[in-house]
């Protein structure tokens, strides 16, 4: 009869230390849906500026903040159907706007920069 060798008994491994990990999930549902803080208004955008004679022909001669000048320009552009039909991001200038932009066509992104030259 063959005797089976017994394997030596293994020692139990020491328990590992578990560190506390902070969860990135919000603690409550209310914290996840809290309204964002309202941004402060930049006073430089709200300062009334006087338009040049060329720009005054489109938006009026009264001093206006930059935001209102851009709004009034868009009202004028839409009223006179000056947006390019193929690419709505481009504006086709009529005689009044050509005096402001110095170009026949501008993109809406460069429009704000061109307007700045006509405000003081």
Image (spheres, rainbow, N blue to C red):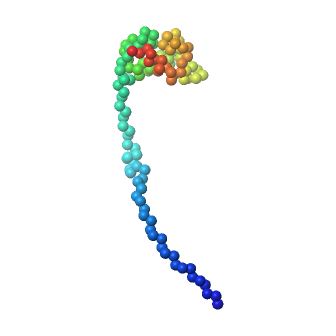
Seen from the viewer's position, the closer of residues 19 and 37 is 19
Residue at image location 39% in from the left, 11% down from the top: 61
Q: Is residue 11 visible?
A: yes
- Residue 108 is left or right of residue 67, and the answer is right
Q: Residue furthest right?
A: 1
Instruction: Give the quarter of the figure containing the N terminus.
Output: bottom right
Give percent across and percent down for residue 51: 41, 13
Give percent across and percent down for residue 91: 54, 18
Residue at image location 50% in from the left, 21% down from the top: 110
Q: Residue furthest bottom?
A: 1
Instruction: Give the quarter of the figure containing the C terminus.
Output: top left
Seen from the viewer's position, the closer of residues 1 and 46 is 1
Name the quadrant containing residue 44.
top left
How many numbered badges does the structure rendering display? 0
Residue at image location 57% in from the left, 82% down from the top: 6
Q: Is residue 60 visible?
A: no
Give percent across and percent down for residue 76: 47, 16
Residue at image location 41% in from the left, 15% down from the top: 119
Seen from the viewer's position, the closer of residues 21 and 75 is 21
Give percent across and percent down for residue 70: 44, 20
Name the quadrant containing residue 66.
top left
- Residue 4 is left or right of residue 35, and the answer is right
């Amino acid at each position: 009869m063959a005797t089976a060798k017994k394997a030596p008994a293994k020692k139990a491994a020491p328990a590992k230390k578990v560190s506390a990990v902070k969860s990135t999930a919000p603690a409550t549902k209310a914290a996840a849906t809290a309204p964002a803080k309202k941004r402060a208004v930049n006073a430089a955008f709200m300062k009334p500026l006087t338009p040049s004679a060329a720009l005054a022909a489109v938006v009026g001669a009264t001093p206006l903040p930059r935001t209102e000048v851009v709004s009034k320009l868009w009202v004028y552009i839409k009223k006179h159907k000056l947006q390019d039909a193929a690419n709505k991001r481009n504006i086709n200038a009529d005689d009044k706007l050509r005096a402001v932009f110095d170009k026949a066509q501008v993109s809406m992104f460069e429009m704000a920069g061109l307007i700045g030259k006509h405000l003081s």
